[in-house]
Amino acid sequence: MTSIVKPPVRHPSLRQNRLGLTLRDYEGVMSTLCAGCGHDSVTAALVQAAWELELEPHRAAKMSGIGCSSKTTAYFMKQSHGFNSVHGRMPSVTTGAAAANRALTYIGISGDGDSLSIGIGQMAHAIRRNVNMLYVIENNGVYGLTKGQFSASADVGSTSKRGEANEQSPIDPALLALSIGATFVARSFSGDKGQLVPILKAGLSHQGLALVDVISPCVTFNDHEGSTKSYRYTREHEVEVVEADYVPVHTEITLPDSQNRLRVVTMHDGSSIRLRSTAADYDPTDRASAYAHVRGCQSRGEIATGLLFVDENSRDMHALLKTPETPLIDIPYEQLCPGAAALDALMARHR
Amino acid sequence: MNGVNDFAFKIGTVNGTGSASANGLLMQAIFRMGIPVSGKNIFPSNIQGLPTWYEIRVSKDGYTARPSEVDLVVALNPATYAKDVATVRPGGHLLYDSSWPLPKELERDGITILGIPFGRMCVEAFEGDRERTLLRNIAYTGALAALLDIDMEVVDRLLNETYGKKPKLLESNHKAIRLGHDYAKRHHPCPLPYRLERMDATGDSILIDGNTACALGAVYAGATVGAWYPITPATSLMEAFKAFCEKYRVDKETGERRYAILQAEDELAAAGIVIGAGWAGARSFTNTSGPGISLMQEFIGLAYYTDIPAVFFDIQRCGPATGMPTRTQQADILSLAYASHGDTKHPILFPANPHEAFGMAVQAFDLADRLQTPVFVATDLDIGMNDWMVKRLQWDDAYRPDRGKVLDAAALEKVKKFSRYHDVDGDGIAARTLPGVGGKGAYFVRGSGHDKHAAYTEDSAAYMEVVDRLRRKFAHAATLVPKPAVTRQKGADIGLVTIGGCDAAVREAADRLREQEILVDVMRIRGFPFGEEVREFLEAYDSVFVIEQNRDGQLRALLAIELGIPRDDMIPVLDYGGMPLAAGVVVQAVCTHLAGAPA
């Protein structure tokens, strides 16, 4: 079988963004995932976010590893280059691409198997380097393509489809990211597009690595009674701790008087995010309190969602590498090669 | 050997005591006297405490291979006395530190033992343990200068160049040099029968190691992204790249860097970064050694199957596993040629010395872009880390990188439909686009089965069309990689085949065999895949010896697999103990075989 191309039907009433593109222009080939898969909702949210942000599709690159999640890069933005790489290694490929051409928007899609088991080292080090990218983990607690083994994000006591309970402690990507210096950490739910779209938009505008952990249920292998990554369980246990609203550069921000827990974070490109904490003591710009709060939710069996942490002073990989604004691939060869005279001079030092 | 400007000496010390700079000083002084010289650092996988040796060969005829015998041993490490005294050739000399009585292990008939109390003299002349230890090395340098007739003016000038900005250190160094020099002059017959005499044979040469030369090649080729994980003996390559970039690629006003060096979390990530950067359009490379190549296998296959350029420098060391990290070998030949699972094959360049490494480093980037595939430059610890006397490196300012077939936005406009893997020209190479180009240039890179349009496929014919194109591309690569270097003599009926750093020893062996009226032609393999010239050479001789530094005859096996030459028709000469090859090994192997061969 091959990929399924969607029929090019366009409804005349489809709205256009300022680039003259409709939502359909941000779609990809037809999904081959199971009907009802959370990942398809994440794809739809990405399409929505990119359309609303007016991303030029050809200036974005979609990066992924291997697994159900990683297949989804084919399902949005068909006018963008895509790279479906090696299991768990999307972060390094993206690091290299970003190092070479910083002018593109990098959208990395991974899963809990791809990022928390085989690729946990690469994810951690991409976070440490603060590669300028959106890093989405479509997290369902299970290996779908190999038919239902537990992943490293499965909660203790969560049961498999056959009834076996997981006994190993889970890795929470949000907590891990917070602990190693991530500059943007969010969690959402594939079933909550209203929350997810603004988070994705904020993540795409963040200067640095924006980690978005999306609970995205596997309808085939992990949506049963006893699973802690099912639609039902997630709906019942989700606690939004920070509401995020993305405000584009060209929109004036007005602050409603009543929202005293409102915080406005200005992004590198001049856009801003309005964050409203639902908990009185929660400060999404304070790493320690964010960590403590998320951990507290976890111990109560709650899933903390929202934009959990953002560092307004994030310095991305290029700032650390001191590379110029001009992408390395656009620097003329003449500025890279020292030339014959320099080599002659150098040879004198080897005598 | 054993005469004026034709001998070898070896210094045994303890690692971490600062002997490296003294040994470098000796090499450079001899080089500046215009005499061909080569040095081999035989060092342990250790920071401090284990034995280390430095071998210096002086050869008026320009032979640079490891010496087959040693005339003089400087034994300064009691832990290796027994071993060191045994390596002196009969009639040679041993110099030891006579601050203490002559130990029993050093007694041996048939050689001359020379004592100089380096330790005691330095204790008396200098303050502090560290200084005394360091300057003992300079003192033996002074003694060797007297014993071997090294020009003291040259030595003094070198010290001034090195320590000119540190007057106190300069003074102690001069003092230490004189201590050793004057003691030797007073107490021993100087110079020894083998000694130095000024020549004019190094004017067009330099002293350089292969890792530095490869790094320079990467700079001159316009590489902008380097990713790596530290590993002996490859580390100094990226360190040199960094130093050159800091020198040549930092904007003086803004401090901005026209390069990105990423120290990865492991070799897998290093390969991924290089491949990501290559896909995005940069010239990118990594430097590693055997264990790193093992870890990079999966990514190498991805780049092969998805047509992404990348350059890998493999500085080979002794395997398997961790092996002997500070010893040399050529044991990655097969694992590079077929790196990764599935049907994969990769172009490899095999430089013989740092001079060739510089040129091949540049060529590797051109080939990677032209062929859109991983290209390997395989050197080894000996080439990579030892200082070699080679011809001066030169650069042609007319050079421009060959970026291969890349369709930009303008070129895409003229194309009706862009199919990433459609072989329009019949050479197996399809034009690529770079991310960001827009229009119809977008495509999806996937390591999973894909057709010529880069679309996912599980269809046999569509899959085979792509892998068959890759096979055509590899055949095309055989016409682009460097041809073998062949030297012939009239009347030769024996062929010697070799590779990489064995070159110097094999060429020297050919000369020595000629003295015994055994005439051999030599072919040094410089690139993989093999071209027709390789087959022609192999088929032209009654006896063909394949000389290489690994246990299993990997080059011989590769020749057999790729060219269909019966493996057992080629006689293996295998030297895999971890030391650079000496000509004597080759001469002996050929002579032994000929003596035992049926008439």
Image (tube, coloured by chain):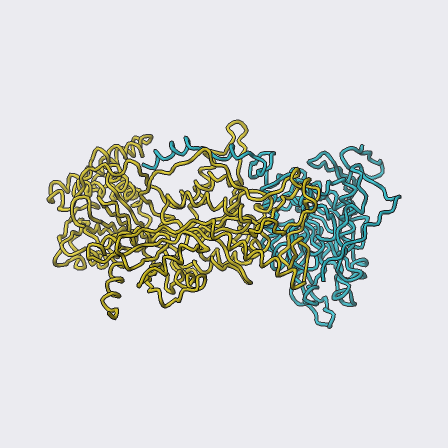
Chain colours: A cyan, B yellow
Question: On screen, B274 above or below B31?
Answer: below
Seen from the viewer's position, the closer of residues A70 and B125 is A70
* Left or right for B133, reference B1: right
The quadrant of the picture occupied by the C terminus of chain B is bottom left
Q: Is residue A285 visible?
A: no
* Left or right for B578, reference B81: right
Res A103 → quadrant = top right
Seen from the viewer's position, the closer of residues A181 and A220 is A220
Q: Residue at 30% of width from left, 32% of height from top?
A: B161
Q: Is residue A120 visible?
A: yes
User: Measured from the top left, where is residue B333 in percent x and y?
Assistant: 43, 58
* Left or right for B450, reference B356: right
Question: On screen, B416 above or below B110?
Answer: above
Question: On screen, B590 above or below A247?
Answer: below
Residue lying farthest to the top in this orientation? B253
User: Measured from the top left, where is residue B213 in percent x and y?
Assistant: 40, 42
Q: How many marks?
A: 0
Residue lying farthest to the right in this orientation? A13
* Left or right for B550, reference B582: right
Seen from the viewer's position, the closer of residues A109 and A348 is A348
Question: On screen, A176 above or below B172?
Answer: below
User: Measured from the top left, where is residue B108 in percent x and y?
Assistant: 14, 58
User: Measured from the top left, where is residue B284 in percent x and y?
Assistant: 53, 45
